[in-house]
């Protein structure tokens, strides 16, 4: 080992979903929205002034903050914006998880949480989901340095009822509780109404899923004004200009088109229901999903072999070679046409 290497901060990095370069693929592996962004987003791009690109963007991201605040009927001072919800969550880890006590999150969950904890030297403990992939609320009523969990959970898609979410928040008044709601728009209940009741709650959402903007990297957090102030202090100490002008303009346009947002999410929910029914007929088992994906297993077919067979046919789903979930595939909900091709493959494979 070279001398300088002993000073390197080493972590096991997060592994993102595969982004295949081939054409004629069916991509059901990264929970992207199968529909394009709002037409108003395209119009916003056309209206951008090219000369403005030589100047720095607004560090406060005021236009987008105002649009989000208006949509959710909160004060702009209650909104923090970042480059995707991953950026928001990373900032939140740095800002709020600074105790010597471990933070808590589920053992089966978004696999970036332990990466951030390692990077920022935050002690953590994972709490095992039940056999049917549910959070046990009692596990989070213990001494800790903070709590984070997705709702609906990823990669399971299971929702923790809002009253259970509140039970966790109420039991932990002295630490920050972060509810990661990347998939909440597909049928789950948001914890946002609880923000006014609990000053230790931070709710994080994103444009990557329900608003078809994964390529623009836009996420936000909503909490009380003091909490958002602390987040901004860290942001301005880290990188003042985190979001570019294009993202801001497109984000505002997407947030303001409520009708298109509701139309596309309804399409995905309808396709999800049909997908659930067809998977059940083929013998798959899965927790009830309130997200834009289904986490499914089949008692007769090995998940890894099925994953590889699908990939050979240029149909991409997500496989996690991890304890407890290595017989499951996470299947993103695509268009009706994409799901028809997916099921045509399954029916042929199983015959």
Image (cartoon, helix red, strand yellow):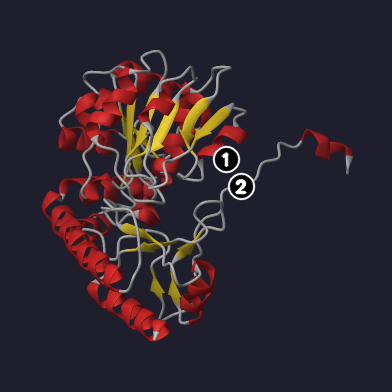
Could you say whether the residue bearing mark 1 is in a helix, strand or loop?
Answer: helix
Task: In the rendered view, tell whether residue 290 sits above or below residue 194.
Answer: below
Viewer can see residue 241: no
Q: Residue placed farthest to the left in the image? A: 259
In terms of image quadrants, where is residue 343? bottom left
> 232 or 110: nearer the eye?
110
Q: For residue 13, which numbered disc appears in the image?
A: 2
**Total numbered circles:** 2
Give the residue displayed 26% in from the left and 50% down from the top: 290
Could you say whether the residue bearing mark 2 is in a helix, strand or loop?
Answer: loop
Viewer can see residue 164: yes
Task: In the rendered view, tell whether residue 1 sits above or below residue 34.
Answer: above
Residue denoted by label 1: 115
Dot 1: few (<14), some (14–19), or many (≥20) neighbours within 10 Å?
Answer: some
Quadrant for the C terminus, please.
Answer: bottom left
Left or right: where 258 falls relative to 106: left
Left or right: where 39 falls relative to 251: left
Quadrant for the N terminus, please.
Answer: top right
Q: For residue 60, which numbered disc appears in the image?
A: none
Q: Residue placed farthest to the top in the image? A: 174
Provide residue 3's location: percent of width, then percent of height: 88, 37
Q: Earlier in the sequence, mark 2 or mark 1?
A: 2
Task: In the rendered view, tell whether residue 85 sits above or below residue 279.
Answer: above
Left or right: where 326 falls relative to 247: right
User: Are the residues tagged 2 and 1 within 8 Å (C-beta)?
Assistant: yes
> 43 or 256: nearer the eye?
256
Provide residue 37's location: percent of width, then percent of height: 25, 59
Dot 2: few (<14), some (14–19), or many (≥20) neighbours within 10 Å?
Answer: few
Give the residue displayed 48% in from the left and 38% down from the top: 128
Provide residue 209's location: percent of width, then percent of height: 31, 53
The Cα atoms of the two marked residues, 2 and 1, are separated by 6 Å
Provide residue 340's location: percent of width, then percent of height: 28, 78
């Amino acid at each position: 080992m070279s001398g300088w290497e002993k000073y390197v901060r080493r972590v096991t990095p997060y592994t993102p979903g595969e982004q295949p370069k081939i054409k004629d693929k069916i991509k059901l592996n990264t929970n992207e929205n199968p529909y394009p962004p709002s037409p108003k987003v395209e119009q916003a791009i056309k209206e951008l002034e090219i000369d403005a690109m030589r100047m720095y963007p607004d560090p406060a991201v005021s236009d987008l903050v105002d649009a989000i605040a208006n949509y959710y009927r909160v004060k702009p001072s209650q909104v923090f914006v970042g480059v995707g919800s991953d950026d928001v969550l990373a900032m939140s880890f740095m800002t709020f998880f600074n105790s010597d006590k471990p933070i808590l999150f589920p053992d089966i969950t978004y696999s970036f949480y332990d990466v951030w904890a390692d990077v920022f030297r935050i002690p953590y403990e994972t709490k095992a989901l039940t056999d049917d992939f549910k959070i046990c609320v009692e596990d989070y009523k213990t001494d800790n340095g903070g709590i984070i969990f997705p709702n609906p959970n990823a990669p399971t898609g299971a929702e923790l009822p809002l009253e259970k979410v509140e039970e966790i928040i109420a039991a932990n008044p002295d630490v920050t509780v972060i509810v990661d709601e990347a998939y909440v728009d597909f049928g789950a209940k948001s914890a946002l109404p609880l923000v006014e009741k609990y000053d230790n709650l931070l709710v994080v959402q994103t444009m990557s899923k329900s608003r078809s903007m994964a390529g623009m990297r836009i996420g936000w957090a909503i909490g009380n004004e003091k909490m958002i102030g602390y987040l901004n202090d860290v942001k301005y100490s880290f990188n003042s200009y985190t979001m570019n002008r294009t993202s801001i303009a497109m984000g505002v346009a997407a947030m303001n088109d409520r009708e298109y947002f509701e139309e596309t999410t309804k399409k995905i929910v309808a396709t999800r229901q049909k997908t659930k029914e067809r998977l059940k007929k083929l013998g798959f088992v899965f927790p009830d999903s309130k997200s834009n994906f289904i986490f499914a297993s089949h008692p007769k077919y090995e998940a890894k072999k099925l994953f590889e067979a699908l990939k050979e046919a240029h149909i991409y789903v997500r496989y996690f070679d991890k304890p407890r979930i290595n017989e499951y595939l996470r299947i993103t909900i695509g268009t009706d046409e994409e799901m028809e091709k997916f099921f045509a493959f399954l029916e042929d494979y199983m015959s």
